[in-house]
Image (cartoon, rainbow, N blue to C red):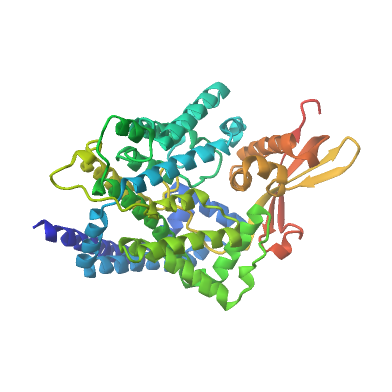
């Protein structure tokens, strides 16, 4: 009976998706225009309305409610169609898919492979800590403090005392090291996850979500599994006490397989939303404009201008979508899995070269695809080799919860901490963007003008991503009074770190609408709005 329960569950899930797609399609036909107008006016989903307000501010005379109805209805119908297609695929391939998933999770592996995952994930956590001074983030002005969506209640609890932040930072570093070397492995892993929830979360309260939440997801799986049974201090101690050598077992493979599946979910929803939101145009002009916007964020144009490759740019965009959608299926096949890993590594390296986006936190986790050992299987009569392993049921429950969380976050586009969909880069092509410019005069009368996103000093201290987030939250804030306070707070940071502003006692801050095309970065702004003035204490 159990052999048919899996396919039946998949078919029911497929029917549910088909039904949902049909219902949504009928709703969109009958009431889609009113739904879109409600989103624009903020009567539905305030977070979506906030982003639409930013989008409208780029061309307020053009982007009326009618504009969004015209451009939004095809997106709604593509969403309904995608759900129907996905449901049909699940229903038709239920038996084969169930067989592949069962075989996937029934695989056994060497305990050393799980040890590699433990060393990599917690080692990467420590490396992130080593390269990020948490006290510098917590010391940023309160005016720039923006809680991730759904975490507004946590803003008053945000740690700002240097002593508290330093203690939290040190505890996280120590737990990451002890988990990495496998000293009291499970306790250390849980400590690293709990402390990491707070420590890794500190930068997330400053206007931008950085996507390394998978460290915590993978850390939970490693904490719930026997990840310290090999290549660890714990293993060395057990060996000295005379324990038997460990054998291949599903208990070591299950968390690794779940990590692979979670990586597949990350890619799948990025591709899914490119198809739904971007549609057929995404692989062409939309991708080119997204590349331009990204180059502007890092103030650097790559050597390989893929935006100028003509039809090959479109082919590359189609290949990106195909890779993201199909990766999760290739992972399920033992034969295709190594090729999926190679494709993923190549994909991330090409992304780094062409966009400057460094997803190293995810790329290092490809260590789960390594298979270093061929240890013998444990015999059914001698399970002493697995005496340290916790019940597999606990790992299965965590696996189910995390995969379900990733799927729900992916379908609903949740972008918070530590639950988030990875960046989809699926939005509409935006040839213009809001940025911030500061102008002042030194004591010698020299006029100084600078854009924080182009400041080498600021980017060296806080990173490209964080500087971009700080600038964006100033430029995107809709309330003029709050926007002015944030602008002055950002100016205070710039004055403290940008050498070009040395000797300036007063700064005028402006919001400017500029073109993202690299050929027009130096052109005068399309629009300019005064935000506020920063003055030194003695000015």
Residue 530 visible, this angle: no
Q: Quadrant of the C terminus?
A: top right
Residue at 80% over, 42% down = 500
In depth, the one of 207 and 236 nearer the eye is 236
With respect to residue 6, does 474 lie above or below? above
Q: Is residue 310 visible?
A: yes
Q: Against 261, is 118 above or below? A: above
- Indicate the position of residue 418 as horizontal and vertical percent values: 42, 42
Residue 290 percent coordinates (x, y)? 58, 62
- Residue 462, by quadrant, is top right
Residue at the outermost right position: 444
> In the drawing, does residue 535 fall left or right of residue 327?
right
Q: Is residue 517 left or right of residue 477?
A: right
Image-based side of 462 in relation to 345, left or right: right
Q: Nearer the viewer, residue 413 or 261?
A: 261
Q: Residue furthest left?
A: 1
Q: Position of residue 488 (x, y in %)?
A: 69, 36
Q: Residue furthest top?
A: 163
Residue under the point 55% across and 42% down: 207
Q: In the depicted view, which residue is nearer to us: 282 or 63?
A: 282
Q: Tally the marks.
A: 0
Name the spot of residue 105 as percent of width and height, x first: 25, 54
Residue appearing at x 51%, y 27% in the figure: 170
Q: Which quadrant, please, contains the N terminus? A: bottom left
Q: Is residue 353 above or below residue 46?
A: below
């Amino acid at each position: 009976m159990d052999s048919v329960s899996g396919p039946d569950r998949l078919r029911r899930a497929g029917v549910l998706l088909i039904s949902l797609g049909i219902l949504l399609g009928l709703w969109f036909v009958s009431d889609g225009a009113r739904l879109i107008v409600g989103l624009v006016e903020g009567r539905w989903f305030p977070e979506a309305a906030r982003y639409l307000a930013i989008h409208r501010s780029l061309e307020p005379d053009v982007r009326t409610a009618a504009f969004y109805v015209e451009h939004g209805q095809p997106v709604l119908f593509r969403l309904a169609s995608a759900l129907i297609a996905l449901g049909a695929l699940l229903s038709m391939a239920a038996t084969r898919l169930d067989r592949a998933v069962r075989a996937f999770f029934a695989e056994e592996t060497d305990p050393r492979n799980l040890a590699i995952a433990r060393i990599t994930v917690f080692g990467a956590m420590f490396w992130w800590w080593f390269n990020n001074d948490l006290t510098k983030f917590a010391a940023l002005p309160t005016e720039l403090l923006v809680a991730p969506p759904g975490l507004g209640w946590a803003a008053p609890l945000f740690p700002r005392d240097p002593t508290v932040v330093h203690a939290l930072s040190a505890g996280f570093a120590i737990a990451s090291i002890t988990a990495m070397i496998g000293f009291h492995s499970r306790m250390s892993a849980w400590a690293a996850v709990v402390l990491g929830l707070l420590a890794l979360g500190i930068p997330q309260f400053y206007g931008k979500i950085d996507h390394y939440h998978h460290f915590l997801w993978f850390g939970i799986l490693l904490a719930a599994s026997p990840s310290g049974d090999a290549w660890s201090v714990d293993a060395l101690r057990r060996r000295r006490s005379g324990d038997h050598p460990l054998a291949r077992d599903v208990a070591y493979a299950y968390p690794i397989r779940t990590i692979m599946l979670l990586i597949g979910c990350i890619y799948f929803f990025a591709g899914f939303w490119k198809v739904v939101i971007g549609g057929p145009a995404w692989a062409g002009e939309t991708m080119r404009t997204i590349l331009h916007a990204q180059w502007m964020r890092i103030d650097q144009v790559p050597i390989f201008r893929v935006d100028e490759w003509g039809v090959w740019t479109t082919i590359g965009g189609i290949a990106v979508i195909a890779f993201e959608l199909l990766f999760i299926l290739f992972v399920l096949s033992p034969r295709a899995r190594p090729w999926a890993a190679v494709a993923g590594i190549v994909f991330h390296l090409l992304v780094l070269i062409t966009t400057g986006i460094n997803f190293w936190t995810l790329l290092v986790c490809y260590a789960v695809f390594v298979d270093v050992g061929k240890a013998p299987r444990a015999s059914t009569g001698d399970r002493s080799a697995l005496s340290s392993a916790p019940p597999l049921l606990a790992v299965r429950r965590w696996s189910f919860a995390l995969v379900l969380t990733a799927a729900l976050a992916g379908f609903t586009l949740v972008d918070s901490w530590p639950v988030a969909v990875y960046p989809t880069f699926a939005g509409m092509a935006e040839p213009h963007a809001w940025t911030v410019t500061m102008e002042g005069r030194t004591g010698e009368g020299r006029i100084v003008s600078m854009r924080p996103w182009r400041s080498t000093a600021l980017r060296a201290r806080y990173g490209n991503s964080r500087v971009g987030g700080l600038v964006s939250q100033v430029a995107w804030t809709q309330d003029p009074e709050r926007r002015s306070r944030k602008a002055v707070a950002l100016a205070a940071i710039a004055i403290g770190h940008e050498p070009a502003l040395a000797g300036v006692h007063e700064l005028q801050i402006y919001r400017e609408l500029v073109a993202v095309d690299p050929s027009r970065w130096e052109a005068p702004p399309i629009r300019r709005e005064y935000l506020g003035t920063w003055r030194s204490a003695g000015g």
